[in-house]
Image (cartoon, helix red, strand yellow):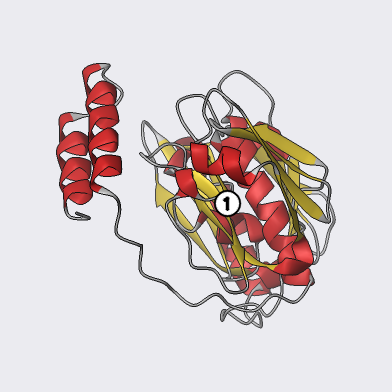
Amino acid sequence: MPHTMSRMGDVLAGFHAAWEFESDSVLIRYERGIRTPKLFQALGERRIPLAAIAGVTLTPGRRGTVVLRAEPRPGADPLMEAAAGQLKEGCDPYRLVLPAERETLAEYYADELRAQLADVDEGPAERYLVAPPEAPMQFKAYDGKASFDGRNVHFRWFWTGASSAKWKAGDQSFRVADLSGVEWRSPEVFEGHLRLLGRESSPVQADQDPAAVVFGVGYGPVHESLPFAAGVLAAVRSAGPTAVPATAAPRRDPADIADRIRHLGELHQAGLVTDEEFSSKKAELLAQL
């Protein structure tokens, strides 16, 4: 007769995190340290209900390691919903990396988890099952400071980075009840941003949109802007948002395109954008003319 994890407190420790297996959830505690990804340090710990897990995998990792991963159910975790597949592998909060010599132990826990998940629905969750990061939260973007108190999101523009369109619009305040979603584009890609979606949004480019803040090198890092996005998204969902229909990106002013290509060239010369990224983004910008 197979053993089941009915005991509280079974712990599997790996690099950067330890998983504590409980009767109805997995408690993930992230380590603090120079080598631990900053996102993990910011999260601290997370309780993942078994109902939020669709499956479990155990695969070989790099340099003599194995990787135990819980597959989150779609719609169950606001952090993963906000990330929308943009997190790098090393920052995936559902991965536990272990030394290869612990593979047998990891396989045991993987099997035990699978047994407990036998009756769990693998389809999309109707509501968030994993608790979101708690407000208040704030971070500095390139063109402004974003803050969230649980009910309202505020953008305060910086004169050094904000566009004239944002200056003309003035500092912004948005009620969660008036929003329908959040769009997060990782700061690790060109044109990363956080945009608040209205119930009838027709978004312009993020640097011209008073409902968005744009990122840049050192501004809006993942460990600050992603938990922020997740917290707002969860608040919007609990307020009963409606889905936002997809809209085509508006055509840009040729002068704006020229400015962006010039800026892209500066990033390329500074070594912050690779040759491939420069060519790809330049072609993308030219296609918008």
Depth check: 20 or 214 in front? 214
Residue extending farthest front: 168
- Please tell me whether residue 228 is drawn above or below residue 65 in the rendered image: below
Total count of labels: 1
- Please tell me whether residue 170 is drawn above or below residue 86 in the rendered image: above
List x then y, in percent, for residue 187. Answer: 47, 38
Image position of 186 (left or right of 272):
right
Residue neighbourhood size for the residue with mark 1, other residues' Cα within 10 Å, grouped as few (<14), some (14–19), many (≥20): some
What residue is disc 1 on? 94
Residue at (66, 83) in percent of width and height: 119
Residue at (35, 39) in percent of width and height: 190
Depth check: 201 or 40 in front? 201
Image position of 137 (left or right of 163):
right
Depth check: 6 or 234 in front? 234
Amino acid type of the residue tagged 1 in the rendering: Tyr
Q: Is residue 235 visible?
A: yes
Residue at (70, 72) in percent of width and height: 51
Query: Tag 1, which secondary structure?
Result: loop
* Among the 4 quarters of the image, the one containing residue 138: top right
List x then y, in percent, for residue 100. Answer: 45, 38
List x then y, in percent, for residue 272. Answer: 31, 23
Q: Which quadrant would the C terminus be assigned to in this image?
A: bottom left
